[in-house]
C-alpha cells in the first residue's frame, strides 16, 4: 500500500479545495435546479470568430505556433491595447499568448516570486490567486475590501498591509465576485503606494471589456510610471465569450514577459493554434460583439440589482464583470447556510461569498450571465425564500 501523502508535494497537499465544491456536489444531484452560479458568458463565441477557427482547420493549420504566439496575434493584441487603452507594447518582446488568462497569472507569479515574498491580494477575489502564490513559494497577504468602499481597494488599506517583504500587488478589477471597478482616480492613489514601496503589480483585467454606465475600464499600466512595474493579464474568455478556446495573454516589460516565456516554453510550448486564428479575428473585428454582449449584460444587471434591493437584500451596484454580490446578513444565516438552504428549499444555486475568502462572509455571488427569463424565475424563487425571514 503506497502512502501517497509521502509521495505528493507538501505545498499541493496544503492547498485547500475550492470552497464551492461541496456545494456544487449537492446541486448536481438535484432536479429542477436553476443556477445563477456560473462564471462564464452564456453567449456562444460570435460566428465570424468561430469561422476563422474552422477555416484554419480546413486549411490544415494544425501545427504549433511560435512559443510566444503567432506574431499576427501579438500585433493585434498590441493594437488593441493602443486603441482601447492608449498604451503601447512591442509585439515582439512585450506580449505573450497563453492558455487562458489563468496561465498568464500562474506564469507571472512563478516568474516573480522568491521564497517568502509577500503577495498583496484584495479580498474577496477570484479563487486562484492564493493557491498560485503559495505554489510559487510566496506568502499571500489578503486585504479586505468593503461594501462601503464599493469593494474597491483603498490606498489606506493597502498601506496598512505593507511590510519589508511586500513584493507584488495583485489588482483584480473589474472584480470577480463583487463587480467592483477602480476608476482612474482610485488607481492613481494606488500607484502612489506602489511607487513608494517599489512594488510590482499583476493586474488581472480579464473583465476589462465588461464595464457599465459611464465607467470605462482603465488599465493600470496607463497610469503614470506604472507601465514598467505592471504585468497585465487578460484573455478572450469573457470579452469574446471564448472560455472553451483557452486563450489569454500577458503584456508587460520585456524582461518579465521574457521570464514568463521561458516557463511557458517548457510547460506549455505554445497556446492552441486554432484558438489563435479565431482570436486574431476577434481582435480585428470583434468590437461590435463586445458592445452587443455588454448591452445585454447591462440589462440583466439592472434587473437583478433592482430585484435584490426590492426584496431587501442590499445590493451594491456593480460596475463591471457579470456578478452581483448582495448582502444576506439580514437573514441571520452564514453565506454557506444561505446557499444550502436556498438550494434545498427553492432549488436555486448561487455561490457563498466565503468561496472568495473569509471576508466574503455575509454575501453571496450571483451571476447574471443568464437569460432574462432565467433570471426572472430565479429572482422570483429567491423572493419567496427571503419572505420567511
Ligand atoms: N481572472 C478572473 C478574475 C476570472 O474570473 C477568471 C475566470 N473565471 C480568470 C482570470 C481566468 O480566465 P481564463 O483562464 O478563462 O482566461
Image (cartoon, rainbow, N blue to C red):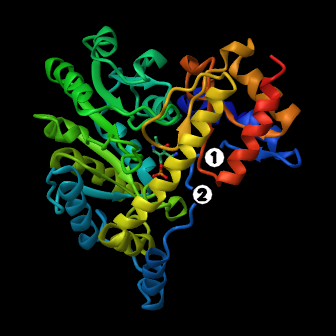
Depth check: give the residue in front, 244 or 281: 281
Name the residue beneath numbered marker 2: 42
Depth check: give the residue in front, 5 or 330: 330
Relative horizontal placement of residue 337, taking residue 134 as reference (left or right)? right
Q: Do the CB atoms of the residues marked 2 and 1 lie less than 8 Å apart?
A: yes
Residue at figure coordinates x 17%, y 56% from the top left? 82
x, y percentage for residue 180?
Answer: 43, 31
Crowd band around label 2 with a 10 angstrom C-alpha radius: few (<14), some (14–19), many (20+): some
Depth check: give the residue in front, 69 or 307: 307
Crowd band around label 1 with a 10 angstrom C-alpha radius: few (<14), some (14–19), many (20+): some
Residue 38 image label? 1
Q: Is residue 60 above or below residue 179?
A: below
x, y percentage for residue 80?
Answer: 25, 60
Relative horizontal placement of residue 194, taking residue 182 as reference (left or right)? left
Report the Cα–Cα distance between label 2 and label 1.
Answer: 9 Å
Residue found farthest to the top? 160
Q: Is residue 6 above or below residue 70?
A: above
Amino acid at each position: 500500500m503506497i502512502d501517497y501523502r509521502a509521495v505528493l508535494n507538501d505545498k499541493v497537499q496544503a492547498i485547500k479545495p475550492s470552497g464551492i465544491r461541496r456545494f456544487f456536489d449537492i446541486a448536481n444531484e438535484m432536479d429542477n435546479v436553476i443556477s445563477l452560479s456560473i462564471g462564464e458568458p452564456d453567449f456562444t463565441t460570435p460566428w465570424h470568430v468561430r469561422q476563422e477557427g474552422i477555416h484554419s482547420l480546413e486549411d490544415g493549420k494544425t501545427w504549433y505556433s511560435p512559443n510566444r504566439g503567432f506574431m499576427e496575434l501579438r500585433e493585434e493584441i498590441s493594437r488593441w491595447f493602443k486603441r482601447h487603452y492608449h498604451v503601447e507594447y512591442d509585439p515582439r518582446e512585450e506580449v505573450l499568448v497563453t492558455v487562458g488568462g489563468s496561465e498568464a497569472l500562474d506564469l507571472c507569479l512563478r516568474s516573480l516570486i522568491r521564497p517568502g515574498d509577500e503577495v498583496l491580494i484584495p479580498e474577496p477575489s477570484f479563487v486562484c490567486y492564493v493557491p498560485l502564490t503559495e505554489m510559487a513559494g510566496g506568502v499571500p497577504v489578503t486585504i479586505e475590501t468593503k461594501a462601503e468602499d464599493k469593494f474597491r481597494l483603498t490606498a489606506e488599506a493597502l498601506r496598512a498591509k505593507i511590510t519589508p517583504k511586500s513584493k507584488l500587488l495583485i489588482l483584480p478589477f473589474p472584480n470577480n465576485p463583487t463587480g467592483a471597478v477602480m476608476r482612474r482616480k482610485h488607481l492613481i492613489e494606488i500607484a502612489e503606494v506602489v511607487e513608494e514601496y517599489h512594488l510590482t503589480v499583476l493586474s488581472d483585467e480579464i473583465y476589462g471589456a465588461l464595464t457599465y454606465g459611464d465607467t470605462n475600464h482603465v488599465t493600470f499600466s496607463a497610469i503614470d510610471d506604472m507601465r514598467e512595474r505592471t504585468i497585465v493579464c487578460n484573455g478572450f474568455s469573457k470579452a469574446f465569450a471564448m472560455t472553451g478556446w483557452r486563450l489569454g495573454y500577458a503584456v508587460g516589460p520585456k524582461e518579465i514577459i521574457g521570464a514568463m516565456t521561458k516557463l511557458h516554453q517548457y510547460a506549455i510550448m505554445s497556446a492552441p493554434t486554432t484558438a489563435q486564428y479565431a482570436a486574431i479575428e476577434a481582435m480585428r473585428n470583434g468590437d461590435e460583439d463586445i458592445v452587443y454582449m455588454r448591452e445585454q449584460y447591462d440589462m440583466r444587471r439592472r434587473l437583478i440589482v433592482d430585484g435584490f434591493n426590492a426584496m431587501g437584500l442590499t445590493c451594491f451596484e456593480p460596475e463591471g464583470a457579470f456578478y452581483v454580490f448582495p448582502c444576506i446578513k439580514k437573514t441571520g444565516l452564514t453565506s454557506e447556510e444561505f446557499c444550502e438552504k436556498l438550494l434545498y428549499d427553492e432549488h436555486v444555486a448561487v455561490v457563498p461569498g466565503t468561496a472568495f475568502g473569509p471576508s466574503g462572509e455575509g454575501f453571496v455571488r450571483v451571476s447574471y450571465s443568464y437569460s432574462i427569463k432565467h433570471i426572472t424565475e430565479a429572482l422570483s424563487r429567491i423572493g419567496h425564500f427571503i419572505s420567511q425571514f
